[in-house]
Image: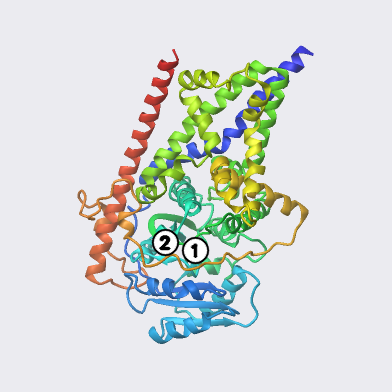
Amino acid sequence: MRTLTTVAHTIAFVCVFFGALPLGTAVAQFLLVGLQRYRGIYARVALCLPRTAVLIPARNEAAVLETSVEALLASAYPEGRLRVFVVDDASTDDTPEVLARLAAAHPGAVVHVRRETGGQGKSHTLNHGLRHVLSDDWAQAVLVMDADVVFAPDTVWRMSRHLGDPEVGAVTAYIQEGSGRGGNYLTRYVAYEYITAQAAARRTQNVLGAIACLAGGAQLHSRANLEALGGEFDTSTLAEDTVTTFDSQLAGHRVVFDGYALVLAEEPDDTAGLWRQRLRWARGNYQVTHRYRRLWFRGRRTGDNRLGSWLFGLIWFSVLLTPFLMLLSAASLLFLFYTDSGGAWYAFKALWVVNLVSYLFVTLLSLAVDPVTARRSWREALIFPGLVSCFFLVVTAAPTVTLPWLDSLGLGLTRDSPHPLMLFAYCWLALCMPLAWAAKCLAGTRLRWLSTPLVHLVGYGSLLAACSLAAFVLQVRGTEQSWGRTVKTGKVRGSGPEPGTTAGPAEPATGRAGPAPGPAARAQARPEAPGGPPDDGLARRFATVTRHDLERDRRLLWWQAMVMVLIGLLMVLREIWLV
């Protein structure tokens, strides 16, 4: 019996740390971010300007469509090489009138493609437009974007430069939350989330050679890639962009994330809207997981792609299963609490030490990856785990100060503390999700004023975890899937700052030249590349910007090393302090 008890305690002790697995895999990803410089993402590019058809699905998008199309057509891209096909999905607002004005202002550059029967979802709308685009041989590449996103002036050719490599089938840009001063606390949370989930995580995926998802609002495909996919997007799931990404790589084409190609997007600014959006995304991810069930952890048996690698699978499932890992960790702590209180206390302390190191590393490096967004949302970055979790992190960071203070208040946080307090601490990873769900529910009532402090209390990450758990329940029950379109109001205005001054830890605001040009800076347009010879001004701009992108990748590696050294010193000082 004693042996069985020991085994049970050991298993429970190990399971406690599953709650830290999402943060642990985030650290593993962030450790690889700086290594992108060795993948040659920007060293092998050349100016490539294919004739590009832009597909914009639009259903009642009158408030945002004109700004997006005008910004796109103002891009630093040769005139006559962009055609915008707006697929009007049976809109009932002023979308047709807006399109008529755009077509009159840009004859031949804006095409209105009307669907009389709509509402089937984004993928059906895109396929309707794609059939129109591929019906002739004009388009050498197809750019898929959302009606509300605003492209920076250099973004289109920053993306298309990768298509000069025949192995590259698709490119995705960095979507930034773009409401700026028109946003609120929730859009700032989203802005910070996009640093971690896109600017950092997708750089890591470039290193791994396996991209999880082409951003739905900014994905550029070569014509050959789309034809290899059968000339249409998936309509059987709620994640057609992820399915397209996986299928492109399984077909033998590389997919590239360009973190310096900037696109601004409006995101939901209330918990109810965010919940609807993320519920759709989460259900789509569960569907994708099942669809590619024979792919996971298969290594090279899936072909030359890296989608079957162990690290990519671990990253995918640690995010997908976050709510279940949090529940498992809390349940394990409760089991130890009632059977081995000393072991429970030790596991709890060790868990939060792991969380502390992970939190410091991810937060500090995220703020370095995109300093412009960091300056706007640094407060949300610091309290991203939630105020309660931040309290545990502070106690973990400075126990010699905080624990005596709590004892003086009669709130001691030790193995000998009153049971209700320790039960709350041990159960927190499970309790935060129903509280996050309550914040969503309160948003639509007269008690909506409670929703904001609840989100701050439990953390934005807990809100996403609760949404993922709800999506799992809906998927298991077989609830009819719905597109759940997010309503946009046009908060994103203008083209924003030059991407060369936004996404990089040490890019000079003046954009002045850096060190001696590398291979990419000396590259000219390949004679055989689509688009023909560029004008001298654009060629010079390409050389300068690409050289800066190479330099920023180098500097990011140094920032990563500095952050690691800083955290190491802080943890050493903590241990000395404890002694």
Say which residue appears at 35% left-offset and 45% top-offset. 37
Q: Do the residues under discs 2 and 1 have CB atoms within 8 angstroms?
A: yes
Kindly identify which residue carries mark 2.
263
- Tell me where residue 203 appears, x and y as whole percent: 43, 48
Residue type, numbered disc 1: Gly
Where, quadrant-wise, is the C terminus in this rendering? top left
SS at circle 1: loop
Q: Count the numbered circles shown.
A: 2
Query: Is 154 on the left or on the right of 195, as rendered?
Result: left
Residue farthest right in this picture = 1
- Tell me where residue 355 appears, x and y as whole percent: 52, 31
Mark 2 → mark 1, Cα distance in angstroms? 8 Å
Where, quadrant-wise, is the N terminus in this rendering? top right
Tell me if residue 52 can be seen. no
Label whose residue precedes the other's in the sequence (2 or 1): 1
Kindly identify which residue carries mark 1.
217
Residue type, numbered disc 2: Val
